[in-house]
Amino acid sequence: MTAEFDSFEELIDSITPDVYENLKRAVELGRWPDGSRLRPGQLELSLQALIVYEAKHLPEHERSGFVERPQKPERCG
């Protein structure tokens, strides 16, 4: 059974936390859970989906690629 979506946004809204974790793992390993390799187009779309999902559902510090920048020390008067 294949789900059909009218837009990329509908697809993102349908992603559950479990699906997100599986998709993230697939991107990290370059393989689907069944062991088959992600094709370049699948990798690209999966990355886009992860970025949009994270922007909608995760705080900035939990998103992929987040780099915490040290705060600048306050200057003395």
Image (spheres, rainbow, N blue to C red):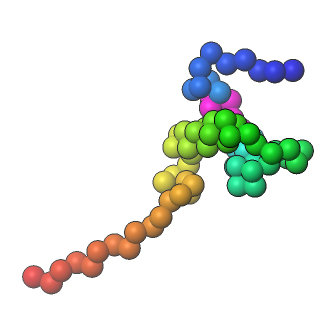
Give above or below for 69 relative to 48: below
Give above or below for 34 relative to 2: below
Q: Residue at x 70, y 37 (%)?
A: 42
Quadrant of the snapshot with the N terminus: top right
Whether residue 22 appears in this view of the structure is: no
Q: Quadrant of residue 64?
A: bottom right
Q: Which residues are magenta?
A: 12-16
Residue 66's spot in the image, x, y percent?
50, 59
Residue placed most toward the observer, 1 or 58: 1
Whether residue 63 appears in this view of the structure is: yes
Q: Residue at x 75, y 55 (%)?
A: 29
Residue placed most toward the observer, 42 or 16: 42
Residue 70's spot in the image, x, y percent?
38, 73
Which residue is most to the right?
Answer: 34
Q: Residue at x 34, y 72 (%)?
A: 71
- What is the magenta segment's predominant secondary structure? loop
